[in-house]
Amino acid sequence: MHLSPTDPSTTSPLGAPHAPGSSVLSITRDWTCPFCPLLCDDLAIESHSDATLSAQNTDCPRLMQALACYGPADEQCRASVDGHDADFDTALTQAARILSTARRPLFGGLGTDVAGARALYPLAAGCGAILDHQHGDALSAATLALQDRGAFFTTLSEVRSRADLLLFFGCQPSRRYPRFFTRTVAGSTTPRDLVFIGCEADPATSGLDNVRVESILANAGPFDPFDTLALWSTISDRRPPSALHQDVADAARVKETLAVLQALQARIDAARYTVLVYEPGALPGPHAALLIEALNRIVKASNLGARAGGLALGGDDGALTVNQAVTWLAGLPLRTRVSAPSRMAGSAPLEYDPHRYRTERLLADGEIDALLWVASFAPPAWPQALADDVPAIVLGHPALARTAAARGPGTVFIPVATPGVDSGGHLFRLDSSVVMPLAAARGTSLATVASVAAQLEERLRAAGAAAQLEAGASASAGAGSAAGYGAQLAAPLTTHPAAQPATPSAPPPQVRP
C-alpha cells in the first residue's frame, strides 16, 4: 500500500543516490522485492521525485545494488534500431520482421514475470523459437533430477515454523540470498541446529539466537561432493559398510567420513523436521543433476523413519516463474522448441532437449539465426558468444540501451518495465509453491514485456496471414494460367481469323444412336 511521504522510516534508506532537492513522492509498505527469489514482502520502499528508489528497514546488499540501476533517465529511454534511436512502432516493426524471417530463433534471458512468460509463449509458437533461461543450467539440473526420481519439497514457512535441523550441503546461503536467515530463522524461539556440510559455516549465522552452528567435512582434504553423497546414500539406505568395495571401506579417510555421516544420519532420525538446503547453481557441473538426485534420494530415504524435506535455492531473475508458466502452457519445461505452424508434416509440435537446447551450446555451434533476449530485472547483457551477424532483439532494462546501440546493425532494443518497480506482476518464490503479487514502486510509461510480446505476436500473425493470402493469390493465378493453357492445347486447330469464311459453317450432322 502507498502511504504519505511523512510516514516515518525505521532505518536510514538505501538505494540510488538522490538529486539535491528531490522529495519523497510515496512510500510503499509490504513491498515485495523482485530482485531475489526469496521475494521478501516485509519491506518499505520510497519513490523519489527524481525517479530514484530507496528501501527502508533493510541492509540487503543485493537490493541496494539493484535499486542503484534506476533513475531519472529511465523514463526518457528510447528504443533503437541498428544503433540509432527509433520510435516504439519502428522498433516493433523491425523486431517483427526479424522474427518472421528467422528459421531457428532463440528466446533467451527470459527475465520476466508470469504475464511476460504467458505472452512470450504464443510468440515463440508463432515463429518456432527455442526457450531457455539465462540460469538454465541450474534450473535444468534440478528439473532433470525431479523427472528421474521425484523430490520432497518444503516451504519457507515450514522451515521457520517446524524445522529444528537445517543441513546446508556445500553452500552458504547469504552469499547470494542475503536475507535467507532473516526469513527462516531470525527472531524464532525454536532451538535449531545448523550444520554446514563440506564448507565453512555461513558468517551470517553468527548473530542468530537459539541456534547451534557447526561445520563438518570442511577440513578433511579436498571435498568431493560425489564421493560424500555416495557414502551418505549408503548410510541413509541402511546398508552396512560392507556394501562398499573392500578397498574403499578400508581407507582411513573413508572410515572417518562414514563415522561423521552416520552421526549426522542419527541426528536426522531423531529430529522433528529436517531440511536439506542446497544451491543447484553452486554445485559443480556438468553433472549437477546427479548430485541433486542423490540429495533427493537421501531426503526420501530419511522420510521412512522421520520427517525431512529439500529446499533448492535458485530461480533468480524469474527463472522458476518462467519455467512454471511454460510447463503449464506446454506440458514441458524450458529448453523446449515450439515448432511454428508451418512446420514440416510429421514433425513434433514440441521438442524438449535440455542438452541440445542449451543457450551456450546453440551459440557456440551457430545453430540459431535470431535472438530475442529478455532482461527486465537487471542490466546483464546477452552472452558475448553471440555472433555479430546474428540479429538480436533486446527487451531489456533501460541500462542496456547503450550496450545494444553499440552492437550496431542487426540489433533492436526496446526498453521494458521491471515488474515490482515500474509495473505490477506475479513471481513464483524459490520454494515453488507460492506465487507473490508485485506492486509497482514508482510510475513510468515503460511498456511491459507482456505488452511488447503481445504486439509482436499480433504483427507476426498479421504478416503470416498476409503471406498466406499472397501465396493463395499466386496459386490461383497460376492455376488459372495452367487451365487456360490446357484449354488451348485441347482446342481443335483453326486457321487464322482472317482466312476464315464470313458465314458460319454448317453444323455437323446428328448421329443417331
Image: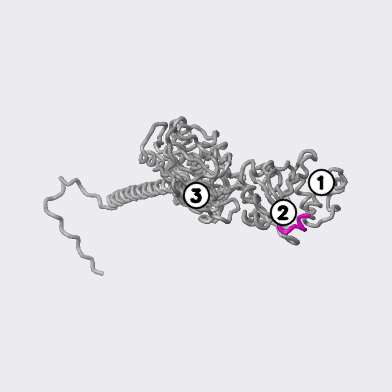
The residue under label 3 is which amino acid type? Arg
Secondary-structure class at tag 3: strand
x and y percentages locating residue 45 in the rendered image: 50, 44
**In the shown orientation, is residue 59 left or right of residue 484?**
right
Q: Which of 482 and 254 is in front in this view?
A: 254
Q: State the image quarter where residue 288 is shown.
A: top right
Q: Which of 200 and 349 is in front in this view?
A: 200
Is mark 3 in CB contact (under 8 Å) with mark 1? no
Reading the image, the residue beneath label 3 is 29
Secondary-structure class at tag 2: loop
Q: Which of 395 and 64 is in front in this view?
A: 64
The residues bearing labels 2 and 3 have C-alpha atoms spaced at a distance of 31 Å
How many C-alpha atoms fall within 10 Å of the one at disc 2: few (<14), some, or many (≥20)?
A: few
How many C-alpha atoms fall within 10 Å of the one at disc 3: few (<14), some, or many (≥20)?
A: some
Reading the image, the residue beneath label 2 is 191
Q: Which of marks 3 and 1 is nearer the N terminus?
A: 3
The residue under label 1 is which amino acid type? Thr
The residue under label 2 is which amino acid type? Pro
The residues bearing labels 1 and 2 have C-alpha atoms spaced at a distance of 27 Å
Q: Which of 470 and 497 is in front in this view?
A: 470
